[in-house]
Structures are given as C-alpha cells and as structure tokens.
Image (tube, helix red, strand yellow):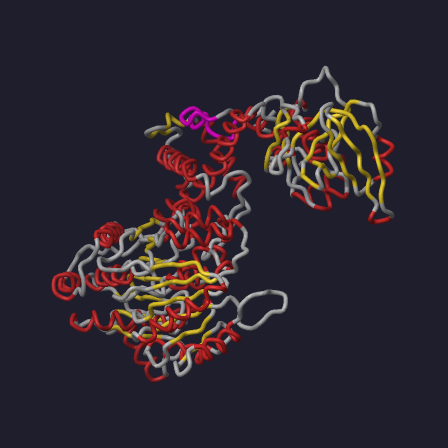
Amino acid sequence: MAYNEAFDIPLNFLKGVGEARAKLFGSELEIHTFRDLLYNFPFRHIDRSRFYHISELTNDAPMLQIAGRFIGFSEEGEGAKQRLTGTFSDGRQVMQCVWFRNIKSIREMYRTGVDYVIFGKPTYYYGYYSMAHPEVEVYDPQKPPSGWRGVYNLTETLRKRGVTSRLMQTLVANLFENRRLAVLDEVLPAEIVSAYRLMPLREALYAMHFPSDAVQLQRATERMKFEELFYIELHILRYARQRNLSIQGHVFGRIGRYFNDFYANQIPFELTGAQKRVLREIRGDMRTGRQMNRLLQGDVGSGKTMVAFMTMLMAADNGFQAVLMAPTEILATQHYASLESWCAPLGLEVRLLTGSTGAAARREIDEGLRSGAVNFVVGTHALLEDRVTFARLGLAVIDEQHRFGVVQRARIWAKNTTPPHVLVMTATPIPRTLAMTVYGDLEVSVIDELPPGRKPVETMLRYSDNRMSVNRLVAQQLREGRQIYFVYPLIRENEKLNLQSLEEGYRVVCDTFRNIPVSFVHGQMKPDEKDHQMQLFVTGQTRIMVATTVIEVGVNVPNASVMVIENAERFGLSQLHQLRGRVGRGADKSYCILMSKANMAATTRKRLTIMTETTDGFLISEADMRLRGPGDMEGTQQSGLAFSLKVADLARDGQILARAREAARQVLDAAPQLYRGGVVPETGNCAGVPTLTPESLGILERELRYRFAHKVDWSQIS
C-alpha cells in the first residue's frame, strides 16, 4: 500500500459510521476521512483508572466513577418539570443520581439490587452529593477500571443525534482495529523523530485517544504539538527564504553625513542600549541586497520613533527617500512635528500628507516626491493613492501596522520597481510565541529598555465606593495644572449592559469638575470633529478628555497625568496597557485608575491585579494570551491566525514552538530544494539533524502539500 493510503479512506467505510453519520461528522466537525478522525483529539481526559468512595467527594471534584447499587427511585413533577431521582449507595454512604430527560426509558433500564458503576461530575446540593445524567453501566468484577477516557468536542446537533464522547472513542477504537491502519508510516522525517526523541506516530496517536497513564499522555501530546508546530514553522520559513531569494532590495552601503551629523550634534537625548542594538540589526539588514522586513516592538515611550527616524537617515545617506505611514491623522501629525524639528538642522525636506492636506499643498508635495526634492513624507492612507509617486523610494516605515489592511500595505511595494525596505512598528507588545507565528517571516527587533528618567505609572484598582477619593486625586492634579483622561467602554447607555457610557460620563465629569473645559471623542464622530476635539486637548485648551478607546494609540500629551478607565473589567490586558501608555509621558508622576465593580469573577480580578503589579508590556502580553488565548489578543484579531491549532497552545507551548522552529530551520538548511523549487542535492545535512534521505524529503513534501495546499500564503505579508 502507498504512503499512508488509509489516511484518505472516506469515513463512511469505517465500522459504525455509514453514509448518514459520515455526512453528519463532515458537516458538524469537518471529519471526512480516517485521518481526520485520528487527528480529532479529545480536548481533555478523565481518569477512570480507579473507583471513588462517596466519602472522598468534594465540591470541586472532577468527573469520576463510583461502584455500588441503587437502593430506590422516586419521580417528581410533570411534563417539562418531571424529574427522576435514584438513591445510590457505595455500601458506606448514599448520594443521588438525577435525570430530567428520557425518564421512562431510564426507569425501565436500571434496577435496585444490581451492581453498577456510575460516572459523572458530583455536586453538593441540599445535604447530598448528586450527579445529573450520569453514565451508568453494569459492574463487572472481572473487568478492571477502564483507565483514561477522552472527552471530545461535540456540537448540539451531534448530541441530539446520539453522538457522545463514548461513541467517538468506540469509533476510534474501530479505526485502530482496521487492518489497513495496522502500520502507519511516519509524517515526520525519521531524522527529526530521532534527533528530538519523539514518540512514534502510531503510538502517539493511540495514546492521544487511549492513554494508559498521565506520563504516556504527556509524551504523546508533546509529540503531536511538535508535529503541528514544526509544519507551521516549516511553511512560514520556507516562504520567507523563497522571498529573500526572489525579492531584491536596495543596498544601503554607507552611513553618511546625515546620520553622523544627527548622531554627533543634533540628537536630543542619549540612545538606550536597546535602541543602539536595534539600529545595528537594521543596518545589517539593509546592506545585504535583500529587502528588509523587520518588526520593531517597543513599549510605549521606548523610543521607536527615534529608531525609525535614524533608519530614514540611512536611506537619505544612500540617496533614497523614505515614508512613514501612521493609521490616524493626529498620530501622523505628531510624527511629522518630531521629524520636522530633527530634519531642519540637517537640511532635509520632510512633508505631511493626510486627507486634510489642501489641494495646492498636495500638488507641491506630489511634485517634490516625484522630483526627489522631498526627502521624507509622513502621512496616513493618503500616501497609498496612485497619484503619490516617488523618485527613489528606499524605505517604508509603518506604525501600528496591524491597523492597515494587507492590500493597503502591499500598495507601498508598488511605488518602486525594487520594493523598499520595510520596518513595521507596534507599541502593542506581542508575546514571543505569537510573534514567531503571526510574524514568523519577519525578523523581530525588541526595544526592551525605557529611556532614563521615565517614572513608572502608578496603577490602582478602585471600586464605586472609592469614587470620592478618585475625584479628590483628579481635582488635586487639575489644581497642579495637569490634564486628565476618562475612558468609557460604551458611547451611549445600553439597557442590556450595566456599564458606564461616555454620554452619561461626560455629563457627570462636567458636573463634578465645574469650570474645567472638557473634550469628548468617540469612534462614531466625523473625522474633522474628532480631530478638532483631540487638538483642543493636545494644545491644552481643554483639561479633561472623555473618550472611548479611540485614544489608545496616537495621543501624545506629556502634561496628562491621570487615566481613569471605567468598567476596566471589560477591557483586555493589552488594551488596558495601551490606554495606560497615554499618561506618564512627561516628567511628572502619573496615575492609572482602574474602576471596576467589586463583585467580579476571580479570573477578572486576576487580570486587573496583574495591571497593578507591573508596567512591563511584554509580561502583560504573555499574561493576556494565557488568560484570553491568542485569537483574542488586541491587535492580532485583525490580522488573524491564518491557521487553526488542534493541539498546540501558543500561550503555553513556547518551548515546544522554539524546538519546532529550530528543527524547521535545520531541515531547510539541509534541504534548500523545499524553498528553491528545484532539485538541489538529493540529500543534505546540518547540525542537529543527520543526513535527510530521499524518503524523508518525500515525507516533508507530501505533508506540506496536505497541510497547506489550499491555504493562503500569508507568510508573504509584510
């Protein structure tokens, strides 16, 4: 039989399935073949290797099994309120089993005086432990406890059609008994399995469904996580290498007078060690003749804009123009103000191009960019218009890049025959494991050091009965000449949600702090009015800003010293950290006050407590991903994870991901034909992985085709 030919057998050929059930599994779970069922792993396992006594039960006990007898049954209620209760004894104590459905058949099925095993989740209720709708089977003293049992994800439609976790396990058992699966060829090269000491495929698949103990399950899970992450990383890295081979870049071979003059005479503050390190990494990229694609991560206030500007100076020193694109007009304007002050002493021309730029100014800027008279341009989406062309564009810096669509970002490439170097920046700290996948084809630089003298923002968790003390702090800061933010989760009141709204908050703030001018901003305002309100606050004409989260990026007011976030429990950690970054930008002590309800869930309290304990954005982003999962991370929802993970967890499997990525690098070093497309050597070797045989190369090519043949090549996105 050909390589794992049985993988592709339609599910209806499996004992216990048939045409109707196969269609149901296909529509509900996307399980169509033997392979799909094998790789449909339980989401958790239950230990059925022992029997418990009722005296051992606790309110937080997991699902478990107890051996004993029913000593009586009683029925109560009628119709939809009917209930059957069975009193069950283990010979020492009694508990209750309760059914609300199928009462007639259950009453006929179970008898008193017969030995049974009941299985379910115990709860304590009115002085007794009880199980609702337990699994019940006749006790066989010759049969030992059944060991570990998997619990599978099921839809409501499947449950209504009689599909249970127990049935799923029976079908998988039938699959392993099928003679066509007696032998399973590896889907990883033997060299990888050996070098990384992985459990063999068939053994691992069996243990994922039928583990003998916790140790075997852990080994099998690690094997399957490695396999999943290895192919994702191999897919990302092969396209990254392919792109590096096929896409040429401008050579920035010299550091000249602009960079040296600025660094020696004009720079307004001493660079941190992290900024210097990142500049060296960027410099190394841009003199290779390959297009740079680098992600620059840095916490709020870490000096990303300075690094971006000095990178733009490298472009100018080599005779190229540079563009800095920001998602909002106010952020673009702030970048422009900084760059203009730095460019003037150097004799470099920098212009601002946004949707508000007048027609005459636009014509002048367009002509300057075409002729090369304009060295740098800062702007918004207006830069993407076809009319904007360059004499010699060499560098594109994209700030808060997740706020630009893929097609929009790609249009920057079209401004030159040879695409510009690309530096994308984000102040949303991205956990390392997420950066290795979502941005796996980009080189990542991190500014993990704040400039000296910056005071950490003091963060406090407060409740409604602390409102007076919060208002006193705000009033004191206003008397000292500072400015204040109030952030709300909603624009207007919603009867279904018991949350503070901006409209009501605006009235309360104006009433509480009378004679203090107040701005208000939300996402449904017209852009001109929103920018006007923001400018009033930026220039100090208003002292308080009442807003929704539209101010989380792009408002730089060093005089703002207090951020009050209403219903803070409604925000993710990364979003709270971004909001907090709006204060603490000056020399004065600053405060972030998280207002929340006192009776919150334990996980919510844990999230908010993390905010009060650290200002490290990377620690916060890791905690946020552990608590919320990668798909909900602020900033990644937009770009999305372009793959689904069946068993690995980016929040917890960083070490496995690092090993899988290293293995993928080694394989590509040993087998460049995987990304070059042609036949290079038939075999190859590298450190850590022995020579790859033709059989191993065939496995890699087949698995890559199977896993990614119909998926978008998302690794090409800059």
Q: Residue at x 67, y 18 (%)?
A: 144
Q: Is residue 8 above or below residue 313?
A: above
Q: Dividing the image into 4 quarters, which one contains the C terminus?
A: bottom left
Residue at the image position 23 percent from the left and 50 percent from the top: 277
In the foreground, 521 or 413: 521
State how many labels appear: 0
Q: Position of residue 619 (x, y in %)?
A: 38, 49
- Asked whether, in this view, residue 114 is left or right of residue 142, the answer is right
Tell me the residue at 43%/52% (across/down). 609
Front residue of 366 and 642: 642
- The stretch of residues the image draws in magenta is 186-198
Who is closer to the viewer here, 465 or 417?
465
Image quadrant where one finds the N terminus: top right
Q: Is residue 87 left or right of residue 318?
A: right
Q: Quadrant of residue 453?
A: bottom left
The reply, left or right, for residue 300 in relation to residue 20 is left
